[in-house]
Image (cartoon, helix red, strand yellow):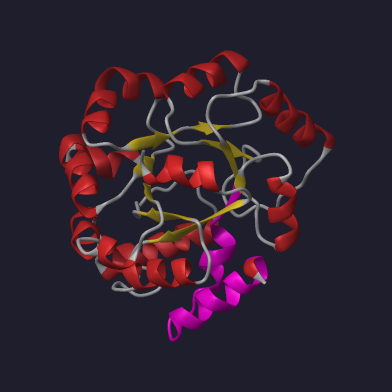
Amino acid sequence: MNRINKLFQEKKNILSIYYTAGYPNLDDTVAIAEELERSGADLLEIGFPYSDPVADGPTIQASSKIALDGGMTLKLLFEQLKDLRKTVSIPVLLMGYVNPMLQYGVENFCKSCAEVGVDGCIVPDLPMQEYEELYSVVFKEYGLTNIFLVTPQTSTERIRKIDGLSNGFIYLLSSSATTGQNLQVSENTEAYFSRIAELKLSNPTMIGFGISSRETFDKACQYANGAIIGSAFVKQLKQDDVAASVKDFMKIFKS
């Protein structure tokens, strides 16, 4: 059983934190992971920055630019993560866009993930059919979970297909907007979450986009197995005292 499956079997109201590798300082990647685990995070999503992050709002776009300008690359990220599992035990995902993964080489990417102890990936612009036909065998060979995204507009047929291809959890976007928008649980949103629940999917679900406070986290957990916080956390990271930034932020959710 992998770390992700074990986590969802053992815990409810799972808190996943996203942050950008190489931000706010180039060498902060592992230190942030360690501090997040110490502060109570259940799952980590480390973003590998890309120059055209179309699904991201201004906060994560800005963090990606700073990281890239500072010298962050996939090669450097894997070098930084080589001793990750000496100090971090919770599940870790890499999140980013398909272009850097293709440039690195998909098999090399999967091999590097496995070597450093990464449990899976979220690649929003990797088409489901392309993953199934070209890459699923390689992901499975290296024991990696591929996390698919669902939006309020995703058809029931496609959701069923995603559920069949998944072996970790399904990422429910609270809206079709970019990251950084506030979660608004309207009648339409409630209907969307209820529709997902009624499908009785095989995989657990996590809600992301717009989770920025204890209130929105608790609200999301009413509809899913947990929630993902990204922009709100990245916004709080301070260059001069990263550890204190992490601790202060996590107190909101773990007090």
Q: Which stretch appears magenta?
A: 227-253
Q: Measuring 52% from the left and 30% from the top, which residue is drawn there?
A: 203
Q: Measuring 39% from the left and 60% from the top, which residue is drawn there?
A: 64
Quadrant location of the N terminus in the rendered image: top left
Left or right relative to 237: residue 107: left
In front here: 111 or 149? 111
Residue lying at the far bottom in this picture: please name it: 240
In front here: 52 or 100? 100
Left or right relative to 234: residue 76: left
Quadrant location of the C terminus in the rendered image: bottom right
238 in magenta: yes
Q: How many marks?
A: 0
30 in magenta: no
Q: Measuring 62% from the left and 73% from the top, which residue is drawn there?
A: 251
Secondary structure, magenta segment, majority class: helix
Q: Position of residue 231 (x, y in %)?
A: 56, 59
In front here: 213 or 222? 222
Q: Position of residue 219 (x, y in %)?
A: 75, 49
